[in-house]
Image: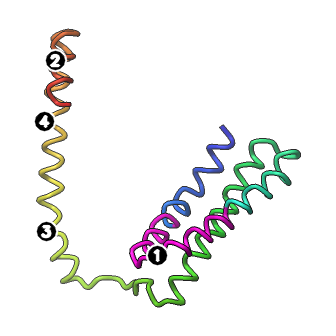
């Protein structure tokens, strides 16, 4: 449980690191991500060796978290040096309106679809095991 708690805190770091790695791959650079991931894995192994004997599974989680933060910093540094990081700015009010006019109908459509499938699934389940199984086969 403690391992998952510690790891959950670094999930955003892991996700962002994956995105930045993909950005490098999109530039047809596969060597830099490989080098960075090798360093991250090495740090994780050293951290495990140092922390696990004293902290157990929590030590493994901390070693993984530290190595992921290093990986994120390395990926970010490479992309910054290559001027490949986006320029983050808050959108204008007009930009927000334009975005919402596009995305609200999509979200509404998806919500209605999920709601409809949920209602149909619940109805099939109330009819018994065979209708529920048939519904599952039909939507799969």
Label at residue 24: 1
Does dot 3 land on a helix, a strand or a loop? helix
Q: Earlier in the sequence, mark 4 or mark 3?
A: 3
Q: Residue 40 appears in which quarter of the rendering?
A: bottom right
- The residue drawn where x is 19% and y is 40% is 114
Q: Earlier in the sequence, mark 1 or mark 3?
A: 1
- In whole angstroms, how far apart are the C-alphas of marks 1 and 3? 30 Å
Tell me if 16 is positioned left or right of 126 in this view: right
Taking 72 as reference, is 139 above or below it? Answer: above
Q: Which residue is mark 2?
A: 134
Does dot 2 land on a helix, a strand or a loop? helix
Q: Residue 22, image x and y in percent?
A: 44, 68
Range drawn in magenta: 17-40
- In whole angstroms, how far apart are the C-alphas of marks 2 and 4? 17 Å
- In whole angstroms, how far apart are the C-alphas of marks 3 and 2? 36 Å
Label at residue 116: 4
Q: Is residue 14 magenta?
A: no
Q: Residue 35 appears in which quarter of the rendering?
A: bottom right
Q: Nearer the viewer, mark 1 or mark 4?
A: 1
Q: Residues within 10 Å of mark 1 (few under 14, many from 20)?
A: some
Q: Nearer the viewer, mark 1 or mark 3?
A: 1
Quadrant including the C terminus: top left
């Amino acid at each position: 449980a403690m391992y998952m708690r510690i790891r959950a805190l670094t999930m955003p770091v892991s996700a962002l690191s994956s995105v930045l790695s993909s950005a490098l791959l999109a530039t047809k650079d596969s060597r830099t991500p490989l080098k960075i991931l090798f360093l991250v894995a090495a740090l994780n192994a050293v951290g495990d060796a140092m922390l696990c004997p004293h902290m157990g599974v929590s030590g493994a989680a901390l070693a993984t978290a530290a190595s992921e933060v290093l990986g994120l910093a390395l990926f970010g540094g490479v992309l910054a040096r290559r001027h490949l990081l986006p320029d983050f700015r808050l959108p204008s009010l007009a930009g927000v309106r334009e975005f919402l006019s596009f995305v609200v109908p999509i979200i509404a459509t998806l919500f209605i679809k999920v709601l409809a499938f949920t209602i149909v699934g619940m109805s099939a389940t109330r009819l018994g095991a065979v209708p529920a199984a048939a519904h599952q086969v039909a939507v799969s």
